[in-house]
Amino acid sequence: MADPVKILILNGPNLNLLGTREPDIYGHETLTDIGRRCEQRAKALGFEIAMRQSNSEGELIDWIHEAVSKWSAIIINPAAYTHTSVAIMDALKLVNCPIVEVHISNIYKRESFRHHSFVSPVATGVICGLGPAGYEFALEAVAGLLRKKEEV
Ligand code: DQA
Protein backbone atom coordinates (compact mmCIF):
# COMPACT_ATOMS: atom_id res chain seq x y z
CA MET A 1 0.00 0.00 0.00
CA ALA A 2 1.21 3.52 -0.79
CA ASP A 3 2.44 5.67 2.12
CA PRO A 4 -0.18 8.20 3.29
CA VAL A 5 0.27 11.77 2.08
CA LYS A 6 1.59 13.78 5.00
CA ILE A 7 0.54 17.39 5.50
CA LEU A 8 2.10 19.77 8.01
CA ILE A 9 -0.22 22.41 9.51
CA LEU A 10 1.68 25.19 11.26
CA ASN A 11 0.31 27.89 13.51
CA GLY A 12 2.15 30.95 14.72
CA PRO A 13 2.10 33.05 17.87
CA ASN A 14 -0.96 33.50 20.09
CA LEU A 15 -3.01 30.97 18.13
CA ASN A 16 -2.70 28.65 21.15
CA LEU A 17 -5.14 31.08 22.81
CA LEU A 18 -7.86 30.75 20.18
CA GLY A 19 -11.24 30.39 21.85
CA THR A 20 -10.53 33.10 24.40
CA ARG A 21 -8.38 35.45 22.29
CA GLU A 22 -10.43 38.29 20.76
CA PRO A 23 -13.44 36.03 20.06
CA ASP A 24 -15.20 38.82 18.18
CA ILE A 25 -12.43 38.51 15.56
CA TYR A 26 -11.36 34.87 15.78
CA GLY A 27 -14.50 33.14 17.09
CA HIS A 28 -14.90 30.71 19.95
CA GLU A 29 -13.25 27.59 18.54
CA THR A 30 -9.98 26.54 20.13
CA LEU A 31 -6.96 25.32 18.17
CA THR A 32 -7.79 21.83 19.46
CA ASP A 33 -11.28 22.14 17.92
CA ILE A 34 -9.72 23.24 14.63
CA GLY A 35 -7.29 20.33 14.84
CA ARG A 36 -10.22 17.94 15.24
CA ARG A 37 -11.96 19.42 12.17
CA CYS A 38 -8.73 19.03 10.22
CA GLU A 39 -8.24 15.41 11.36
CA GLN A 40 -11.72 14.52 10.08
CA ARG A 41 -11.28 16.28 6.76
CA ALA A 42 -7.79 14.84 6.33
CA LYS A 43 -9.08 11.32 6.98
CA ALA A 44 -11.72 11.76 4.27
CA LEU A 45 -9.00 12.91 1.86
CA GLY A 46 -6.60 10.10 2.80
CA PHE A 47 -4.05 12.46 4.39
CA GLU A 48 -2.06 12.17 7.57
CA ILE A 49 -1.64 15.52 9.30
CA ALA A 50 0.50 17.04 12.01
CA MET A 51 -0.96 20.16 13.62
CA ARG A 52 1.66 22.26 15.40
CA GLN A 53 1.74 25.65 17.08
CA SER A 54 4.60 27.76 18.33
CA ASN A 55 5.07 31.24 19.69
CA SER A 56 8.68 31.13 18.54
CA GLU A 57 9.83 32.13 15.05
CA GLY A 58 12.87 29.83 15.19
CA GLU A 59 10.80 26.77 16.04
CA LEU A 60 8.41 27.47 13.15
CA ILE A 61 11.41 27.78 10.82
CA ASP A 62 12.89 24.46 12.04
CA TRP A 63 9.53 22.80 11.30
CA ILE A 64 9.37 24.38 7.83
CA HIS A 65 12.84 22.91 7.12
CA GLU A 66 11.43 19.43 7.83
CA ALA A 67 9.11 19.90 4.86
CA VAL A 68 12.08 19.78 2.50
CA SER A 69 12.07 15.98 2.89
CA LYS A 70 9.26 14.85 5.16
CA TRP A 71 6.01 16.57 4.18
CA SER A 72 4.00 16.74 0.94
CA ALA A 73 2.47 20.16 1.66
CA ILE A 74 2.41 22.90 4.27
CA ILE A 75 -0.63 24.77 5.51
CA ILE A 76 0.52 27.74 7.54
CA ASN A 77 -1.15 30.42 9.59
CA PRO A 78 1.93 32.47 10.48
CA ALA A 79 -0.23 34.81 12.66
CA ALA A 80 1.62 38.07 13.43
CA TYR A 81 4.82 36.74 11.77
CA THR A 82 2.91 37.06 8.48
CA HIS A 83 3.53 40.77 8.64
CA THR A 84 7.09 40.81 9.98
CA SER A 85 9.07 37.69 9.17
CA VAL A 86 11.55 37.72 6.31
CA ALA A 87 13.06 34.63 7.98
CA ILE A 88 9.85 32.60 7.61
CA MET A 89 9.51 33.78 4.00
CA ASP A 90 13.10 32.68 3.29
CA ALA A 91 12.50 29.28 4.91
CA LEU A 92 9.34 28.72 2.84
CA LYS A 93 11.33 29.50 -0.33
CA LEU A 94 13.44 26.38 0.36
CA VAL A 95 10.44 24.10 0.35
CA ASN A 96 9.49 22.40 -2.87
CA CYS A 97 5.88 21.52 -2.07
CA PRO A 98 2.52 23.31 -2.12
CA ILE A 99 2.16 25.98 0.58
CA VAL A 100 -1.25 27.31 1.57
CA GLU A 101 -1.35 30.41 3.78
CA VAL A 102 -4.41 30.62 6.03
CA HIS A 103 -5.85 33.50 8.04
CA ILE A 104 -8.96 33.12 10.14
CA SER A 105 -9.78 36.82 9.89
CA ASN A 106 -9.85 38.94 6.76
CA ILE A 107 -6.53 40.75 7.23
CA TYR A 108 -7.45 43.23 4.48
CA LYS A 109 -10.45 44.47 6.49
CA ARG A 110 -8.26 45.18 9.52
CA GLU A 111 -5.43 47.59 10.46
CA SER A 112 -3.22 48.62 7.53
CA PHE A 113 -0.13 46.92 9.05
CA ARG A 114 -1.91 43.58 8.52
CA HIS A 115 -2.39 44.23 4.80
CA HIS A 116 1.13 43.19 3.92
CA SER A 117 2.15 39.53 4.04
CA PHE A 118 5.75 38.37 3.64
CA VAL A 119 4.38 34.86 3.14
CA SER A 120 1.88 35.41 0.30
CA PRO A 121 4.54 35.95 -2.42
CA VAL A 122 6.03 32.51 -1.67
CA ALA A 123 2.74 30.68 -0.98
CA THR A 124 0.94 28.67 -3.63
CA GLY A 125 -2.32 30.26 -2.49
CA VAL A 126 -4.00 32.13 0.33
CA ILE A 127 -7.26 31.53 2.23
CA CYS A 128 -8.29 34.50 4.30
CA GLY A 129 -11.31 35.68 6.26
CA LEU A 130 -13.37 32.48 6.17
CA GLY A 131 -12.97 31.61 9.85
CA PRO A 132 -11.65 28.28 11.16
CA ALA A 133 -13.21 26.52 8.15
CA GLY A 134 -10.32 28.06 6.18
CA TYR A 135 -8.07 25.25 7.44
CA GLU A 136 -10.39 22.63 5.97
CA PHE A 137 -10.62 24.54 2.70
CA ALA A 138 -6.82 24.57 2.69
CA LEU A 139 -6.76 20.76 2.98
CA GLU A 140 -9.17 20.53 0.02
CA ALA A 141 -6.94 22.92 -1.92
CA VAL A 142 -3.88 20.79 -1.14
CA ALA A 143 -5.73 17.69 -2.39
CA GLY A 144 -6.39 19.47 -5.69
CA LEU A 145 -2.83 20.77 -5.98
CA LEU A 146 -1.28 17.35 -5.31
CA ARG A 147 -3.63 15.72 -7.82
CA LYS A 148 -2.58 18.28 -10.41
CA LYS A 149 1.10 17.61 -9.61
CA GLU A 150 0.56 13.86 -10.17
CA GLU A 151 -1.01 14.52 -13.57
CA VAL A 152 2.02 16.46 -14.83
C1 DQA B 1 -4.20 35.96 11.79
C2 DQA B 1 -4.16 37.44 11.38
C3 DQA B 1 -2.90 38.11 11.88
O1 DQA B 1 -2.88 39.47 11.48
C4 DQA B 1 -2.83 38.05 13.38
O2 DQA B 1 -1.64 38.61 13.86
C5 DQA B 1 -3.04 36.67 13.92
C6 DQA B 1 -4.03 35.79 13.28
C7 DQA B 1 -5.53 35.29 11.40
O3 DQA B 1 -5.59 34.06 11.43
O4 DQA B 1 -6.52 35.97 11.10
O5 DQA B 1 -2.47 36.30 14.93
O6 DQA B 1 -3.17 35.27 11.10
Image: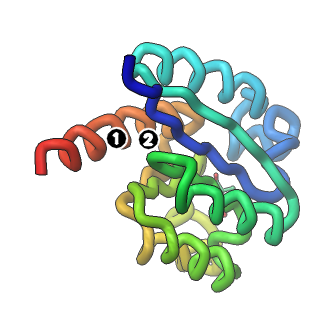
- Name the side, left or right, on which 24 lies relative to 1: right
Foreground: 25 or 102?
Answer: 102
Q: Secondary structure at mark 1?
A: helix
In whole angstroms, how far apart are the C-alphas of marks 2 and 1?
5 Å
Identity of the residue drawn at 42% across and 20% down: 46
Q: Quadrant of residue 85?
A: bottom right
Amino acid, disc 1: Ala
Residue corresponding to mark 2: 138
Write down which quadrant ligand 1 falls in: bottom right
- Per the rendering, the mark at residue 141 is 1
Quarter of the figure that contains the N terminus: top left
Q: What residue is drawn where x is 82% and y is 71%?
A: 58
Residue at 42% x, 77% y: name it.
121
The residue lying furthest to the left in this view is 152
The residue lying at 80 percent from left, 70 percent from top is: 57
Image position of 72 (left or right of 86): left
Point out residue 132 in the picture as x, y percentages from the top left corner: 59, 35
Task: From the top left corner, tell me how far across and down residue 22 is, in percent.
Answer: 81, 46
Q: Is mark 1 within 8 Å of ligand 1?
A: no
Q: What's the residue type where badge 2 is placed?
A: Ala
Relative side of 38 to 146, left or right: right
Q: Could you tell whether 86 is left or right of 116 in the image?
A: right
**Residues tagged 2 and 1 counted as in contact (Cβ below 8 A):** yes
Vertical relation: 37 (above or below) 54? above
How far from the left and from the top, in percent, is residue 108? 50, 66
Q: Which mark is residue 58?
A: none
Observer-nearest of 147 and 124: 147
